[in-house]
Image: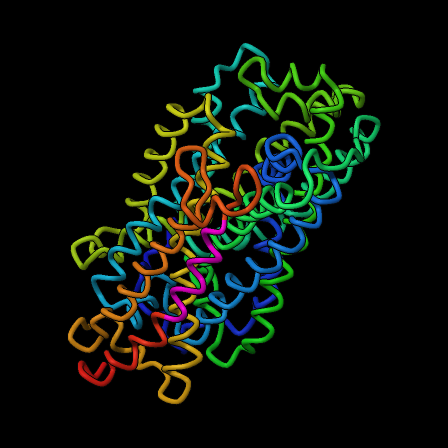
Amino acid sequence: MGVELRGIERVMPEDRQPKGVINNLLMWWSVNCVLTTVPIGTLGPAVFGMGLRDTILSIVGFTILGCFTTAFCATLGPKLGLRQMVISRFSFGWWGAVFLSLLNIITQIGFSVIAVILGGQTLVYVCGEKLPLDVAIIIVSVVTLLICFFGYDLVHKWERYAWILISIIMCILYGTGHEYYSWTPSTSSGADLAGSVLSFGGVVFGSVIGWAPIAADYNVMLPEDTSAWKVFWLTFLGLFIPLVFVESLGALYGTALINNPAWETIYQDGEAGLGSVLGTSLSSLGGFGKFLVFLLALSVVSNNVPNTYSAALSIQTLGKPFQRVPRFIWTILVAVAYTVAGVAGKANLSAILNNFLSILSYWTTPFVVVLALEHFVFRRRTGYNVNDYGDQSKLPWGLAAGAAGVIGVVGAVLGMNQTWYIGPVGKLTGTYGGDLGFEMALVLTSVAYLALRPMELRYVGR
Protein backbone atom coordinates (compact mmCIF):
# COMPACT_ATOMS: atom_id res chain seq x y z
CA MET A 1 0.00 0.00 0.00
CA GLY A 2 3.03 2.30 0.14
CA VAL A 3 2.73 2.94 3.87
CA GLU A 4 6.01 4.02 5.47
CA LEU A 5 7.16 1.34 7.92
CA ARG A 6 10.17 3.22 9.29
CA GLY A 7 9.70 4.91 12.65
CA ILE A 8 12.40 6.62 14.71
CA GLU A 9 15.17 4.26 13.62
CA ARG A 10 18.23 5.96 12.14
CA VAL A 11 18.23 6.31 8.36
CA MET A 12 21.56 4.85 7.28
CA PRO A 13 23.72 6.80 4.78
CA GLU A 14 23.24 4.17 2.06
CA ASP A 15 19.45 4.57 2.32
CA ARG A 16 19.45 8.34 1.79
CA GLN A 17 18.29 10.19 -1.32
CA PRO A 18 20.84 12.31 -3.24
CA LYS A 19 18.35 15.08 -4.03
CA GLY A 20 15.48 16.94 -2.40
CA VAL A 21 17.20 19.68 -0.38
CA ILE A 22 14.96 22.27 -2.09
CA ASN A 23 12.07 20.71 -0.14
CA ASN A 24 13.38 22.63 2.88
CA LEU A 25 12.13 25.75 1.15
CA LEU A 26 8.98 24.38 -0.46
CA MET A 27 7.76 22.28 2.45
CA TRP A 28 7.98 25.03 5.05
CA TRP A 29 6.42 27.48 2.62
CA SER A 30 3.43 25.17 2.19
CA VAL A 31 3.21 24.50 5.93
CA ASN A 32 3.02 28.21 6.80
CA CYS A 33 1.26 29.76 3.80
CA VAL A 34 -2.07 28.60 5.17
CA LEU A 35 -5.26 29.83 6.75
CA THR A 36 -4.00 29.17 10.30
CA THR A 37 -1.23 31.77 9.93
CA VAL A 38 -3.68 34.61 9.23
CA PRO A 39 -5.15 35.03 12.76
CA ILE A 40 -1.67 35.36 14.29
CA GLY A 41 -1.24 38.71 12.55
CA THR A 42 -4.82 39.68 13.39
CA LEU A 43 -3.98 39.59 17.11
CA GLY A 44 -1.71 42.64 16.82
CA PRO A 45 -4.42 45.24 16.06
CA ALA A 46 -7.45 43.33 17.36
CA VAL A 47 -6.13 42.13 20.74
CA PHE A 48 -3.03 44.17 21.57
CA GLY A 49 -4.23 47.50 20.15
CA MET A 50 -1.21 47.90 17.89
CA GLY A 51 -1.17 49.97 14.71
CA LEU A 52 -0.39 48.38 11.37
CA ARG A 53 3.19 49.66 11.22
CA ASP A 54 4.09 48.44 14.71
CA THR A 55 2.38 45.10 14.07
CA ILE A 56 4.24 44.41 10.82
CA LEU A 57 7.60 45.49 12.25
CA SER A 58 7.03 43.15 15.20
CA ILE A 59 6.10 40.32 12.85
CA VAL A 60 9.31 40.77 10.85
CA GLY A 61 11.61 41.10 13.87
CA PHE A 62 10.31 38.24 15.98
CA THR A 63 9.89 35.97 12.96
CA ILE A 64 13.59 36.40 12.16
CA LEU A 65 14.49 35.34 15.70
CA GLY A 66 12.26 32.28 15.49
CA CYS A 67 13.56 31.28 12.06
CA PHE A 68 17.12 31.04 13.39
CA THR A 69 16.04 28.43 15.94
CA THR A 70 14.07 26.16 13.61
CA ALA A 71 16.57 26.45 10.76
CA PHE A 72 19.39 25.36 13.09
CA CYS A 73 17.44 22.29 14.22
CA ALA A 74 16.76 21.37 10.59
CA THR A 75 20.51 21.09 9.90
CA LEU A 76 20.83 18.18 12.34
CA GLY A 77 18.61 15.86 10.28
CA PRO A 78 21.00 15.12 7.39
CA LYS A 79 24.03 15.12 9.68
CA LEU A 80 22.68 12.45 12.04
CA GLY A 81 19.86 10.74 10.15
CA LEU A 82 17.74 10.87 13.32
CA ARG A 83 14.40 12.43 14.22
CA GLN A 84 14.47 15.61 16.31
CA MET A 85 13.28 14.12 19.59
CA VAL A 86 15.78 11.26 19.27
CA ILE A 87 18.56 13.80 18.70
CA SER A 88 17.67 15.42 22.03
CA ARG A 89 18.88 12.24 23.78
CA PHE A 90 22.48 13.36 23.12
CA SER A 91 22.03 16.32 25.50
CA PHE A 92 18.95 15.64 27.64
CA GLY A 93 19.58 11.91 28.05
CA TRP A 94 17.09 9.08 27.65
CA TRP A 95 14.53 10.16 30.24
CA GLY A 96 14.92 13.83 29.43
CA ALA A 97 14.04 13.01 25.83
CA VAL A 98 10.98 11.10 27.05
CA PHE A 99 9.77 14.17 28.93
CA LEU A 100 10.46 16.42 25.93
CA SER A 101 8.57 14.01 23.70
CA LEU A 102 5.54 14.31 25.95
CA LEU A 103 5.73 18.10 25.69
CA ASN A 104 6.12 17.85 21.93
CA ILE A 105 3.10 15.56 21.60
CA ILE A 106 1.02 18.16 23.45
CA THR A 107 2.53 20.94 21.32
CA GLN A 108 1.80 19.28 17.98
CA ILE A 109 -1.72 18.31 19.04
CA GLY A 110 -2.25 21.93 20.13
CA PHE A 111 -1.20 23.19 16.70
CA SER A 112 -3.55 20.66 15.13
CA VAL A 113 -6.48 21.77 17.28
CA ILE A 114 -6.05 25.33 16.00
CA ALA A 115 -5.82 24.08 12.41
CA VAL A 116 -8.91 21.88 12.45
CA ILE A 117 -11.05 24.51 14.19
CA LEU A 118 -10.12 27.26 11.75
CA GLY A 119 -10.39 24.98 8.73
CA GLY A 120 -13.73 23.73 9.99
CA GLN A 121 -15.02 27.27 10.55
CA THR A 122 -14.17 28.19 6.97
CA LEU A 123 -15.86 25.07 5.57
CA VAL A 124 -18.98 26.07 7.53
CA TYR A 125 -18.95 29.44 5.79
CA VAL A 126 -18.74 27.74 2.39
CA CYS A 127 -21.51 25.22 3.07
CA GLY A 128 -23.70 27.36 5.32
CA GLU A 129 -25.80 25.86 8.10
CA LYS A 130 -26.05 22.60 6.19
CA LEU A 131 -22.65 21.60 7.58
CA PRO A 132 -22.29 21.57 11.39
CA LEU A 133 -18.92 22.77 12.69
CA ASP A 134 -18.27 19.43 14.41
CA VAL A 135 -18.59 17.60 11.09
CA ALA A 136 -16.40 20.17 9.33
CA ILE A 137 -13.65 19.65 11.92
CA ILE A 138 -13.84 15.89 11.37
CA ILE A 139 -13.53 16.36 7.59
CA VAL A 140 -10.32 18.39 7.95
CA SER A 141 -8.90 15.78 10.33
CA VAL A 142 -9.68 12.88 8.01
CA VAL A 143 -8.02 14.53 4.99
CA THR A 144 -4.90 15.18 7.09
CA LEU A 145 -4.86 11.59 8.33
CA LEU A 146 -5.02 10.15 4.82
CA ILE A 147 -1.79 11.93 3.88
CA CYS A 148 0.08 11.24 7.13
CA PHE A 149 -0.94 7.59 7.14
CA PHE A 150 1.38 6.83 4.21
CA GLY A 151 4.34 8.68 5.68
CA TYR A 152 7.47 10.63 4.73
CA ASP A 153 7.35 10.45 0.92
CA LEU A 154 3.71 11.45 0.52
CA VAL A 155 4.13 14.25 3.10
CA HIS A 156 6.95 15.73 1.02
CA LYS A 157 5.07 15.29 -2.27
CA TRP A 158 2.02 17.11 -0.87
CA GLU A 159 4.03 19.95 0.65
CA ARG A 160 6.15 20.41 -2.51
CA TYR A 161 3.20 21.82 -4.45
CA ALA A 162 0.54 22.89 -1.93
CA TRP A 163 2.01 26.38 -1.49
CA ILE A 164 1.47 27.52 -5.10
CA LEU A 165 -2.30 27.87 -5.24
CA ILE A 166 -2.67 29.12 -1.66
CA SER A 167 -0.06 31.86 -2.24
CA ILE A 168 -2.17 33.09 -5.16
CA ILE A 169 -5.31 33.11 -2.99
CA MET A 170 -3.49 35.12 -0.31
CA CYS A 171 -2.56 37.70 -2.95
CA ILE A 172 -6.21 37.94 -3.99
CA LEU A 173 -7.21 38.46 -0.33
CA TYR A 174 -4.77 41.36 -0.10
CA GLY A 175 -6.71 43.05 -2.88
CA THR A 176 -10.32 42.24 -1.96
CA GLY A 177 -10.11 43.69 1.54
CA HIS A 178 -8.11 46.84 0.73
CA GLU A 179 -10.92 49.38 1.17
CA TYR A 180 -11.24 48.57 4.88
CA TYR A 181 -7.57 48.61 5.86
CA SER A 182 -6.56 51.25 8.39
CA TRP A 183 -3.20 52.89 9.04
CA THR A 184 -4.33 54.18 12.43
CA PRO A 185 -1.38 54.24 14.87
CA SER A 186 -1.19 52.11 17.99
CA THR A 187 -3.55 53.00 20.81
CA SER A 188 -0.64 53.18 23.27
CA SER A 189 2.86 54.65 23.24
CA GLY A 190 6.11 54.52 25.17
CA ALA A 191 6.39 51.75 27.75
CA ASP A 192 2.80 50.61 27.20
CA LEU A 193 3.46 50.12 23.48
CA ALA A 194 6.70 48.29 24.31
CA GLY A 195 4.69 45.93 26.51
CA SER A 196 2.26 45.23 23.67
CA VAL A 197 5.11 44.61 21.24
CA LEU A 198 6.76 42.16 23.66
CA SER A 199 3.52 40.26 24.28
CA PHE A 200 2.54 40.11 20.61
CA GLY A 201 6.14 39.29 19.71
CA GLY A 202 6.02 36.33 22.07
CA VAL A 203 3.07 34.96 20.12
CA VAL A 204 4.85 35.46 16.79
CA PHE A 205 8.08 33.92 18.08
CA GLY A 206 6.16 30.98 19.53
CA SER A 207 4.52 30.30 16.17
CA VAL A 208 7.96 29.88 14.55
CA ILE A 209 9.98 28.12 17.25
CA GLY A 210 7.09 25.69 17.63
CA TRP A 211 8.46 23.96 14.51
CA ALA A 212 11.94 23.49 16.02
CA PRO A 213 11.10 20.23 17.89
CA ILE A 214 10.18 18.57 14.58
CA ALA A 215 12.43 20.34 12.04
CA ALA A 216 14.97 17.52 11.64
CA ASP A 217 12.21 14.95 11.04
CA TYR A 218 11.91 16.06 7.41
CA ASN A 219 15.61 16.00 6.49
CA VAL A 220 16.65 12.51 7.57
CA MET A 221 16.62 11.23 3.99
CA LEU A 222 19.20 13.78 2.78
CA PRO A 223 22.84 12.64 2.43
CA GLU A 224 25.21 13.21 5.35
CA ASP A 225 27.36 15.58 3.30
CA THR A 226 24.45 17.90 2.45
CA SER A 227 25.57 21.48 3.06
CA ALA A 228 24.39 22.60 6.50
CA TRP A 229 24.33 26.21 5.29
CA LYS A 230 22.11 25.28 2.37
CA VAL A 231 19.69 23.44 4.66
CA PHE A 232 19.75 26.35 7.12
CA TRP A 233 19.00 29.13 4.65
CA LEU A 234 16.43 27.20 2.63
CA THR A 235 14.59 26.38 5.86
CA PHE A 236 14.97 29.98 7.07
CA LEU A 237 13.48 31.43 3.88
CA GLY A 238 10.82 28.72 3.71
CA LEU A 239 9.63 29.93 7.10
CA PHE A 240 10.28 33.66 6.89
CA ILE A 241 8.70 34.50 3.53
CA PRO A 242 5.25 32.90 4.04
CA LEU A 243 5.00 33.80 7.73
CA VAL A 244 5.65 37.50 7.17
CA PHE A 245 3.53 37.52 4.01
CA VAL A 246 0.47 35.85 5.58
CA GLU A 247 0.72 37.34 9.08
CA SER A 248 0.92 40.80 7.52
CA LEU A 249 -2.29 39.96 5.67
CA GLY A 250 -3.76 39.02 9.03
CA ALA A 251 -2.63 42.35 10.45
CA LEU A 252 -4.41 44.20 7.64
CA TYR A 253 -7.59 42.24 8.29
CA GLY A 254 -7.17 42.97 12.00
CA THR A 255 -7.36 46.70 11.24
CA ALA A 256 -10.33 46.02 8.96
CA LEU A 257 -12.21 44.37 11.82
CA ILE A 258 -11.80 47.57 13.82
CA ASN A 259 -12.54 49.84 10.87
CA ASN A 260 -15.56 47.92 9.58
CA PRO A 261 -18.24 47.17 12.23
CA ALA A 262 -20.06 44.87 9.82
CA TRP A 263 -17.02 42.59 9.58
CA GLU A 264 -16.56 42.67 13.34
CA THR A 265 -20.17 41.55 13.76
CA ILE A 266 -19.64 38.74 11.25
CA TYR A 267 -16.48 37.71 13.09
CA GLN A 268 -18.17 37.59 16.50
CA ASP A 269 -21.43 35.98 15.44
CA GLY A 270 -21.95 32.41 14.30
CA GLU A 271 -19.60 29.46 14.02
CA ALA A 272 -17.59 30.51 10.97
CA GLY A 273 -15.43 33.11 12.79
CA LEU A 274 -12.50 34.47 10.77
CA GLY A 275 -13.45 32.18 7.90
CA SER A 276 -16.66 34.16 7.44
CA VAL A 277 -14.71 37.45 7.30
CA LEU A 278 -12.34 36.13 4.63
CA GLY A 279 -15.31 34.64 2.78
CA THR A 280 -17.13 37.98 2.87
CA SER A 281 -14.02 39.66 1.50
CA LEU A 282 -13.95 37.22 -1.43
CA SER A 283 -17.72 37.39 -1.99
CA SER A 284 -17.26 40.11 -4.61
CA LEU A 285 -15.87 37.37 -6.86
CA GLY A 286 -19.16 35.45 -6.74
CA GLY A 287 -19.10 31.68 -6.96
CA PHE A 288 -15.40 31.70 -7.79
CA GLY A 289 -14.77 33.53 -4.51
CA LYS A 290 -16.61 30.82 -2.59
CA PHE A 291 -14.51 28.18 -4.35
CA LEU A 292 -11.36 30.02 -3.24
CA VAL A 293 -12.64 29.99 0.36
CA PHE A 294 -13.13 26.23 0.08
CA LEU A 295 -9.52 25.80 -1.06
CA LEU A 296 -8.39 28.11 1.73
CA ALA A 297 -10.18 25.93 4.27
CA LEU A 298 -8.37 22.85 3.01
CA SER A 299 -5.02 24.69 3.15
CA VAL A 300 -4.87 23.93 6.88
CA VAL A 301 -4.15 20.32 5.91
CA SER A 302 -0.66 21.43 4.84
CA ASN A 303 -0.14 22.91 8.29
CA ASN A 304 -1.63 19.93 10.04
CA VAL A 305 0.29 17.18 8.25
CA PRO A 306 3.69 17.70 9.95
CA ASN A 307 2.00 18.11 13.34
CA THR A 308 0.29 14.74 12.99
CA TYR A 309 3.27 12.90 11.50
CA SER A 310 5.79 14.16 14.07
CA ALA A 311 3.50 13.68 17.06
CA ALA A 312 3.36 9.98 16.15
CA LEU A 313 7.18 9.87 16.00
CA SER A 314 7.37 11.55 19.42
CA ILE A 315 5.13 8.84 20.85
CA GLN A 316 7.59 6.22 19.59
CA THR A 317 10.40 8.11 21.35
CA LEU A 318 8.71 7.49 24.71
CA GLY A 319 10.33 4.06 24.89
CA LYS A 320 10.87 0.74 23.15
CA PRO A 321 7.35 -0.62 23.86
CA PHE A 322 5.93 2.43 22.06
CA GLN A 323 8.46 2.05 19.26
CA ARG A 324 7.24 -1.49 18.53
CA VAL A 325 3.81 -0.14 17.60
CA PRO A 326 3.83 0.97 13.92
CA ARG A 327 3.95 4.73 13.36
CA PHE A 328 0.71 4.78 11.36
CA ILE A 329 -1.23 3.41 14.36
CA TRP A 330 -0.03 6.31 16.51
CA THR A 331 -0.90 8.66 13.64
CA ILE A 332 -4.53 7.53 13.81
CA LEU A 333 -4.67 7.99 17.61
CA VAL A 334 -3.14 11.48 17.35
CA ALA A 335 -5.76 12.46 14.77
CA VAL A 336 -8.55 11.22 17.03
CA ALA A 337 -7.10 13.20 19.96
CA TYR A 338 -6.97 16.57 18.21
CA THR A 339 -10.33 16.03 16.54
CA VAL A 340 -12.00 15.50 19.93
CA ALA A 341 -10.10 18.48 21.40
CA GLY A 342 -11.06 20.64 18.41
CA VAL A 343 -14.75 19.85 18.80
CA ALA A 344 -14.53 20.63 22.53
CA GLY A 345 -12.64 23.93 22.08
CA LYS A 346 -14.31 25.22 18.92
CA ALA A 347 -15.80 28.29 20.65
CA ASN A 348 -12.49 29.54 22.06
CA LEU A 349 -10.13 29.75 19.07
CA SER A 350 -8.76 33.25 19.81
CA ALA A 351 -7.98 32.40 23.44
CA ILE A 352 -6.39 29.07 22.46
CA LEU A 353 -4.27 30.79 19.80
CA ASN A 354 -3.02 33.60 22.06
CA ASN A 355 -2.28 31.56 25.18
CA PHE A 356 -1.00 28.43 23.45
CA LEU A 357 1.51 30.16 21.17
CA SER A 358 2.82 32.39 23.97
CA ILE A 359 3.37 29.50 26.39
CA LEU A 360 4.82 27.33 23.62
CA SER A 361 8.08 29.28 23.56
CA TYR A 362 8.56 28.76 27.31
CA TRP A 363 9.75 25.17 26.79
CA THR A 364 10.92 25.25 23.18
CA THR A 365 13.41 28.05 23.89
CA PRO A 366 15.35 26.08 26.57
CA PHE A 367 15.15 23.05 24.28
CA VAL A 368 16.79 24.82 21.33
CA VAL A 369 19.35 26.62 23.51
CA VAL A 370 20.57 23.34 25.03
CA LEU A 371 20.75 21.62 21.60
CA ALA A 372 22.67 24.56 20.12
CA LEU A 373 25.18 24.81 22.99
CA GLU A 374 25.71 21.04 22.98
CA HIS A 375 26.30 21.10 19.22
CA PHE A 376 28.50 24.18 18.87
CA VAL A 377 30.34 24.13 22.22
CA PHE A 378 30.52 20.69 23.80
CA ARG A 379 30.51 18.50 20.66
CA ARG A 380 32.40 20.88 18.41
CA ARG A 381 35.42 18.56 18.39
CA THR A 382 34.05 15.17 19.41
CA GLY A 383 30.88 15.09 17.32
CA TYR A 384 28.16 12.47 17.84
CA ASN A 385 28.42 8.70 18.03
CA VAL A 386 25.08 8.27 16.31
CA ASN A 387 24.97 4.52 16.93
CA ASP A 388 24.48 5.27 20.64
CA TYR A 389 21.05 6.82 20.09
CA GLY A 390 19.22 3.69 21.28
CA ASP A 391 21.62 2.68 24.07
CA GLN A 392 20.69 4.36 27.33
CA SER A 393 23.97 3.30 28.98
CA LYS A 394 26.01 5.33 26.48
CA LEU A 395 23.90 8.50 26.46
CA PRO A 396 24.38 11.47 28.81
CA TRP A 397 22.47 11.41 32.06
CA GLY A 398 20.89 14.70 31.04
CA LEU A 399 21.34 16.27 34.48
CA ALA A 400 22.86 19.48 33.14
CA ALA A 401 20.28 19.83 30.36
CA GLY A 402 17.41 19.04 32.71
CA ALA A 403 18.57 21.51 35.35
CA ALA A 404 19.25 24.23 32.76
CA GLY A 405 15.82 23.61 31.23
CA VAL A 406 14.11 23.94 34.61
CA ILE A 407 16.01 27.16 35.31
CA GLY A 408 14.99 28.47 31.90
CA VAL A 409 11.33 27.66 32.52
CA VAL A 410 11.53 29.43 35.90
CA GLY A 411 12.87 32.45 34.02
CA ALA A 412 9.97 32.20 31.59
CA VAL A 413 7.48 32.13 34.46
CA LEU A 414 9.10 35.22 35.96
CA GLY A 415 8.81 37.03 32.64
CA MET A 416 5.45 35.77 31.40
CA ASN A 417 2.44 38.02 30.90
CA GLN A 418 -0.76 36.08 30.35
CA THR A 419 -4.38 36.82 31.18
CA TRP A 420 -4.25 34.28 34.01
CA TYR A 421 -0.79 35.10 35.41
CA ILE A 422 1.76 37.92 35.21
CA GLY A 423 5.28 37.28 36.49
CA PRO A 424 7.22 39.91 38.45
CA VAL A 425 9.47 40.68 35.47
CA GLY A 426 6.50 40.64 33.11
CA LYS A 427 4.93 43.47 35.13
CA LEU A 428 7.82 45.86 34.64
CA THR A 429 7.04 47.12 31.14
CA GLY A 430 4.25 49.69 30.97
CA THR A 431 0.88 49.76 32.70
CA TYR A 432 -0.18 46.27 31.64
CA GLY A 433 3.26 44.68 31.44
CA GLY A 434 4.89 42.82 28.56
CA ASP A 435 5.73 39.18 28.00
CA LEU A 436 9.46 38.54 28.44
CA GLY A 437 9.08 34.80 28.93
CA PHE A 438 11.17 33.44 26.06
CA GLU A 439 13.85 36.14 26.49
CA MET A 440 14.29 35.24 30.15
CA ALA A 441 14.33 31.53 29.29
CA LEU A 442 17.01 32.05 26.64
CA VAL A 443 19.39 33.94 28.92
CA LEU A 444 19.01 31.78 32.03
CA THR A 445 19.17 28.48 30.13
CA SER A 446 22.35 29.58 28.37
CA VAL A 447 24.11 30.61 31.57
CA ALA A 448 23.02 27.49 33.44
CA TYR A 449 23.99 24.99 30.73
CA LEU A 450 27.40 26.55 30.12
CA ALA A 451 28.06 26.22 33.86
CA LEU A 452 26.57 22.77 34.48
CA ARG A 453 27.49 20.74 31.39
CA PRO A 454 31.28 20.82 32.04
CA MET A 455 30.58 19.48 35.53
CA GLU A 456 28.47 16.65 34.13
CA LEU A 457 31.16 15.74 31.62
CA ARG A 458 33.81 15.77 34.35
CA TYR A 459 32.01 13.67 36.96
CA VAL A 460 29.75 11.49 34.79
CA GLY A 461 31.95 11.25 31.72
CA ARG A 462 29.21 11.46 29.09
Residue 437 in magenta stretch: yes
Image coordinates for residue 67, horizontal then vertical, percent: 57, 60
Q: How is the image coloured?
A: rainbow
Using the rendered image of the protein, determine whether residue 142 is visible from the camera's viewpoint. Answer: no
Q: Residue furthest right?
A: 179
- Which residue is rendered at x = 47% and y = 46% of the image? 426
Residue drawn at 80 percent across, 29 percent down: 176
Say whether residue 20 is left or right of residue 333.
right
Residue at (63%, 39%) from the top-left corner?
Answer: 41
Dominant secondary-structure state across the stretch colored magenta: helix
Occupied quadrant, residue 297? top right
- Asked if residue 269 is positioned above or below residue 52 in the image, the reply reads above
- The image shows residue 105, relative to residue 369, as above or below, that is above
Judging depth in this view, the residue of 116 and 450 nearest the camera is: 450
* Image position of 70 (left or right of 369): right
Q: Quadrant of the C terminus?
A: bottom left
State whether residue 106 is above or below residue 237: above
Q: Residue at x 43, y 64 (%)?
A: 368
Q: Is residue 329 visible?
A: yes
Stretch of the chain drawn in magenta: 436-447
Please tell me which residue lies in front, 336 or 100: 100
- On the image, the x and y values in percent for residue 213 come to 41, 57
| 106 left or right, relative to 394 | right
- The image shows residue 170 at horizontal and vertical percentages of 72, 39
Q: Position of residue 263 (x, y in %)?
A: 70, 19
- Which residue is more in the foreground, 310 or 377? 377
- Number of marks: 0
